[in-house]
Amino acid sequence: MTQTITQEQVLEALSRVKDPELHRSLTELNMVRKVEVRNNDVEITLAITVPNCPFVNQIEAEVREEVGALPGVSNVTLHIGAMTEEERKRLEGKQEEGTAAKYNQIQHVVAVMSGKGGVGKSLVTGLLATALAKEGHRIGILDADITGPSIPMLFGLQGPVEMGPVGIRPFQSKTGIKVISMNFLLPSEDQPVIWRGPLIGRAITQLWGDVMWGDLDYLFVDLPPGTSDAALTTMQSLPVQGIVIVTTPQSLATMIVRKAVHMAQTVGVPIIGVVENMSYFVCPDTGNRHFIFGPSHVNDVTSAASTTLLAQLPIDPEVAFLCDNGGIEDINLPAILKMSEAFSTVVTVLAKK
Amino acid sequence: MTQTITQEQVLEALSRVKDPELHRSLTELNMVRKVEVRNNDVEITLAITVPNCPFVNQIEAEVREEVGALPGVSNVTLHIGAMTEEERKRLEGKQEEGTAAKYNQIQHVVAVMSGKGGVGKSLVTGLLATALAKEGHRIGILDADITGPSIPMLFGLQGPVEMGPVGIRPFQSKTGIKVISMNFLLPSEDQPVIWRGPLIGRAITQLWGDVMWGDLDYLFVDLPPGTSDAALTTMQSLPVQGIVIVTTPQSLATMIVRKAVHMAQTVGVPIIGVVENMSYFVCPDTGNRHFIFGPSHVNDVTSAASTTLLAQLPIDPEVAFLCDNGGIEDINLPAILKMSEAFSTVVTVLAKK
């Protein structure tokens, strides 16, 4: 029987090996530089404090013991190098930020943005993520709305998070989506985060760099309203490949959404497409479509963004109910499949550029 | 025939009088300390550079000429004092910030907040402001949503603003509401404001202190979503008497709105009441009420805030249409009158505390 070993299991094992001098784990000390797993073989690259460290044999023995004990491991190859002068100095301080990032491999980072609040950014993020997860893609969601996070409730997830060997361990949703949100780090979900902009930006880079995302095909970043710190930090500090813009039919929303479009253009991040939410309501009494928020102005947005319309989503009480009860992955609308297909097509084109 | 003279007309006249030495106007030099208008009598207090200024007679003559020429003025009383040493030094620099604030008299400053985006903060701000303006109160709206301002479109107002003698002149809406918004200062309404938090906070204090609000009974501050810079600066730097909280029926919205409630409690600003927007939709085909966004959770908010429910507003396509077309002052809903009455009652109680 072959057992699949994961990188995370190896890191976990390495977190149990302590440097005999510094009394802290190899992972915590940022000594683990690379972990590769091929079938039953594990290859590990370490950087210890100094090349002639007297404890090198002890460290090697303990690593072989811990990793070798993992079920399914047949060979452990070890490369041991030394830290740079600068890295050694940094050891005096606390754990380096963004350690987890070194082990993450993320193919596509996609931001979901609007400028305007309450148009359904988190809904679109969750629907796209779910559709792609159901197709077999490895998906993550980084909830970048630090002061008003919606993602945890949509997926029925609650904190607190656990710490893994090299960072924060994201939650896994029912369909296997890895999710992280500021709300998982708060003592209660209705506690406010009363922070000024610089801290908001810093929180987002930490949710990116300190989280054990592992290998992902798509990471969706759900942005808050506005064109200030959260959007700016995400576009400048994360390798965002493209942006999905969300709007509603109201001309008022459209005006503000166009600001977001112009910001993306200013910063130079491509726009993947536009989703119009709350387009209409089908009256259950008569089956008639009611354009509750007025006629669509989505063409103003797609033409300002020189991009395509990915979907028009109806207002549906069933959707609101599922969102309020952690059931976003159970939402079934014909428009979703069309949206995720159009999305994938554009992303494939962008990736080739 | 009696003509009504306004403080602004007097300031305007004084802005045409220049200090003979400094070649800048009395208003620009911050020499005008007080302007009082009673019927046809104008009383002006000036502070000139030094007590024995050789140009005092010339200044006095020009002030009497300019102000005396205003239609309806019969008497001009002048008190002339001197600046302090510190004030004189400051003259070396540029125009002091917040000059306008010295001439503003605002009885009640009320913030409209939600935490959550897109719930209708600007709608509630506009409806309350209009209802009170129609009752004869002198009303202003400070649109503190710097990156996503909705107020200008709701009232059908467009920039650019004009500079008055001591600061920015707010726009006047159809019902006489004085309105200021970041959008009036931008070259086009869909230009983004890509600013980090500290600039957002500074913009809000400027829209407060550099705007010629004059005498107001109520100034409404329409906050953006979130509990970051805009909300923090407004609550800490402006004399906010109370907060109106806006929510929608969704449990998701309620969770985030409770964060705003807890922020207000942390900062120590009283909550006037809660307005639930988008409560239901009356189908025009059948007259049935549809609870599109699910059953109300407003009691969770009022009990967390220990406050009262001011109104539940329906979703109404006519409202959306009027909002998109600058017609918020023409909205006619029975719930509005009840809302403004409940609001006034609470504010009266708060004012006595």
Image (cartoon, coloured by chain):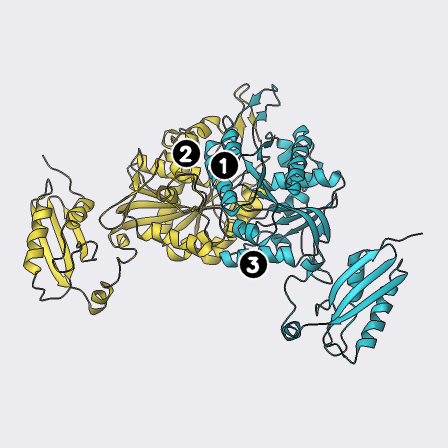
Chain colours: A cyan, B yellow
SS for tag 3?
helix
Circle 1: residue type: Asn
Circle 3: residue type: Arg
Q: Position of residue B22 (x, y in %)?
A: 16, 59
Q: Image point 70% across, 72% down: which residue? A: A83
Chain letter for mark 3, please.
Answer: A
Residue at which label 3 appears: A202
Q: Position of residue B30 (x, y in %)?
A: 21, 57
Visible in this render: residue A187? Answer: no
Which numbered marker is on residue B336?
A: 2
SS for tag 1?
loop
Give the alpha-carbon distance from disc 2 to disc 1, as whole Å: 11 Å
The answer to the question of whether label 3 and label 2 lie on touching residues, with beta carbons closer than 8 A, is no
Side of B178 where A119 appears, left or right: right
Chain letter for mark 1, please.
Answer: B
Q: Quick check: do tags 2 and 1 share a chain?
A: yes
Residue furthest to the front: A353
SS for tag 2?
helix
Which numbered marker is on residue A349?
A: none
Which one is nearer the viewer's eye here, A114 or B170? A114
Chain letter for mark 2, please.
Answer: B
Q: Position of residue A304 (x, y in %)?
A: 49, 35
Circle 2: residue type: Ile
Image quadrant in which you'd find residue B335: top left
Side of B44 where B270 appears, left or right: right
- Image quarter of the C terminus of chain A: top right
Residue at which label 1 appears: B277
Task: Answer above or below: position of A8 versus A285.
Answer: below
Give the alpha-carbon distance from disc 3 to disc 2, as whole Å: 42 Å
